[in-house]
Image (spheres, coloured by chain):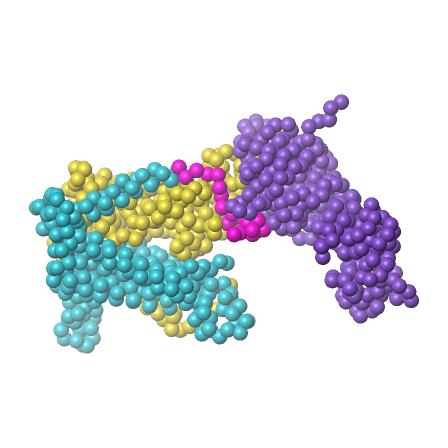
Amino acid sequence: MRPAPPRVRLEEVTHRFGDVTALDGVSLDVLEGEFVTLLGPSGCGKTTLLRIVAGFERPTEGRVILGGEDVTRTPAHRRPVNMVFQRPTLFPHLDVFENVAFGLRIAGVSRDEIRARVGRALQLIRLEGYEGRRNYELSGGQMQRVALARAMVNRPKVLLLDEPLSALDLKIRLEMEAELRRVHRETGATFVYVTHDQREALALSDRIVVFNEGRVEQVGEPDRVYRNPASPFVARFVGDSNVIAVEVTSGDTVRIAGRAMPAASDGIAQGAAWLVLRPDVVRLSAPRSGTGLRGVVRDVSFRGTGHTYRVEVEGLPDPIKAEMREGRTFELEDEVEIGWDPAASPLLPRAADEP
Amino acid sequence: MASVAEESQRPPAARRRGGGSIIPALPAAAGLVAFFLVPLLVFAVYSFLTAGLYSVSGPLTLDAYGEAVASRVNRTLAANSAVIGLATAVVTVAVALPIAYWLRRSARRLRIPVLFLIIASMFASYLVRIYAWRTVLGSNGLINDGLRRLGLIDEPLEFLIYSRFAVTVALVHIFLPYVVLVIYAAMAPLGAGLFEAAQDLGASSRTLWRRVILPLMAAPAASAFLFVFILSASDYVTPQFLGGASGVTLGVQVQVNFRTLGNYPVAAATSFLMMAAFLACYLLSALVLRALRLHDIRFVN
Amino acid sequence: MERTQRSPFTATVTALSLLFLFVPIAVVVLFSFHSTGGLSFPFRGFSLRWYEEVFSSPEFREASVNSLVVATATAVVTLLLGTLAAYGLSHSRSRLRGPLALLFFLPLTLPGLFIGLSLLVLFTEVQIDASLATVTVAHLVYVFPYFLLVSLAALNRLDVALEEAGADLGANSWLVFRKVTLPQVWPVLVGAASLAFALSFDEFIITFFVIGADSTLPMFIWSTLRRTVNPSINAISSLLLLVTLLLFVISFVLTFRRGRKRRGVIGGEELMEQALAGDPIGGRT
């Protein structure tokens, strides 16, 4: 049986603003029913890509194909997609009901059907009874939920979400994440989500697309991207990992800061490499005699779930970040020995002249 | 060169809309071309023609300009116009500054009512104001009458009416509200925490004024000054009613040339000479501001 | 908002200026009710006779009607053309924006003398007779920049995301304008139109040149002023003041209205500041 065409396909999408290249030859497939997150730092092009899918920008080069149909030239209001914006852009002159019904009215849906569908949409976001409220009577989280309903009520093939939670308080954000997951499950729609918050991306997505400076660095399931980053950038951005320049001396040893430490082979036989050390994989212990890696604690912060340390190591340009949930705790200026599980710390290729 | 990061981080409302067409603006543009640019052009051509009685004829000549420049009367009137224009501009700006400052820094709850009043006064009809000042300044008017009753004077004060003073007073009355609004808007930073921020950094009030407020206000104040100067200097109605013999201006002369004497070319030439003088003032002001690097300061809140 | 600062000097200047602005006008209004014709104190009793005299004058009635007609025509045409122009300027990235804006705002910088004279010259050349129509055309040229200033500031302040949301939900440009932009912006547009009406109703400097045998109210006042010192001028002036004050109040309320009910709609004060700060094209492109 032939597989269904991807719900969204981007072919070699390039976009330039003047002499700035926002997107450089991006190709991507989003499958039906997926929750895909475009993740990256500010300015990496992820919002631009979303807006191109929505139809608010036309790509300088490349094609946008929705469900097999080329929509590159189709204006925004005719595309079968809907968007939830970063700030709740509810129409201030309309109440909740009319806001949600907006798209349906434009489409000429019958009055009865409008009432039914708006009712179900409000049920979906658990705001039944709020039909008559105006935007100034709603909290930020409620407004975003209404915006979500307003988009979903049109049964879009693809729902685009542009950092919809970034303007909300942390606690509300966490609740909304659960809401979004639930709505996604219950409706089976395809979600394309944009955020710079890697924690959010890891929590919500079926697949993550990591962007950097207009290019895709890695595409994969959250687990893979987190544990097996494809590049130093992804390692630093997604896992907040330590990325350390090392020399591979043999199949299972690397030289780091002048010491020899065990490592997983990862297919790099010899030479320059990056060692990716996730902070939660690093183990700090009291210094023992021996040739292990030593360092001095320069910063301690308590996070409720554990401690985060920054350990300065002679010979390394940046401190090593370590997260420890159990075991003994350390204080500023303590000398520690640093260890880690080589199997959980991949090596990445490094050009010899990269610092 | 704005980076992509800057472009996407701009506040959403400031992100430029695109994709719309400029076509809706074209009908109005066509109207203005037809009824503003073209008439000015025709009027300019008139200034190069020869005068008939209430008519013009070719060939093109500079006679009208020569006549306009040579006329002794014109030079006196030009001086009059300049004096009145300058006096009006100086007084309005000088008075507007304290008012705007008060509105920004001291007014509190009175701010909106006073602003309302000031804007409301803009709507009093032009002619009504002239008439009102004639009533107040006249020899039997409010001031003279009041002073006489109080025994302070025997004869009415001459300079009050039918003088450049009277014209200036009336013009100030007309333009003051506008200038107050412009300067008030330019003083926006004063109401937005700028004083406190600067003090926190160690700046005295004087430093703040010298280095921040005055530079911020230079361009708007200059443009308000010019606006008032040009409109006052070219006014032709106020001098007729309040100027008497000594308060006649160039604008009056232009009007007389045109309507009464039917000498279109000279009227046109005088008008364009006035315009050239005004343009020179604009350019001078722009150059000075640019030289002082005060021309593109903008406060963004 | 920061701590306020007491300043008796500036407060005094403000108070005196307000007196300066309103006393002459108040005097005129006061004396319009004066039972005798005198224009000096003491005040000898109230009477409406000057108003009666004014209203019974056919020239006055005709002039008023003419003014109303011209002002209405001016306001309506300005509203239509001006809204279109403001929409075009604020929604387009065309390179014509700059030159067009320059063209639109140029009449503001020229004294009425020039505008009036040059229009008269044009009409003479093209052999169009002076009439209320020529007056309306002149008023349109004069009034247009003021309307545009206010309406452009309002359209530029509108959150782009709202219009994008409308488009995203299926509305084309016209529907977005009708269902998203207009509901937010119409008070300002109507306010600006009534500003246009008031400016036209009051206009004298340009009208003087392009008018024919008909009279408008300001022209009527002017000719009365030139003839005699007739106390009924006080009454006429007061009536004119009343009309324009009313229009101003309407304009002010519509343009500067704030309040909870309109959160998300343009705030009046920022609007005024943007308009006055001289950045009519708006945005920091």
Q: Residue at x 55, y 47 (%)?
A: A20
Q: Residue at x 24, y 55 (%)?
A: B275
Is A89 or B293 nearer to us in this picture? B293
Residue B20 among those drawn in magenta: yes
Seen as rendered, the residue at the extreme bottom is B152
Q: Position of residue A79 (x, y in %)?
A: 58, 32
**Chain A shade:** purple
Residue B7 among those drawn in magenta: yes
Chain letter, colour cyan in render: B
Chain letter, colour yellow in render: C
Using residue A194 as the reference point, say whether residue C275 is left or right of it: left
Is A351 or C206 nearer to us in this picture? A351
- Give the residues in magenta: B1-23
Q: Residue at x 21, y 67 (%)?
A: B165
Kindly indicate the quadrant of the structure image that contains residue B99: bottom left
Using residue C192 as the reference point, say whether residue C4 is left or right of it: right
Q: Position of residue B198 (x, y in %)?
A: 51, 70
Kindly indicate the quadrant of the structure image that contains residue B287: bottom left
Q: Position of residue B151 (x, y in %)?
A: 18, 77
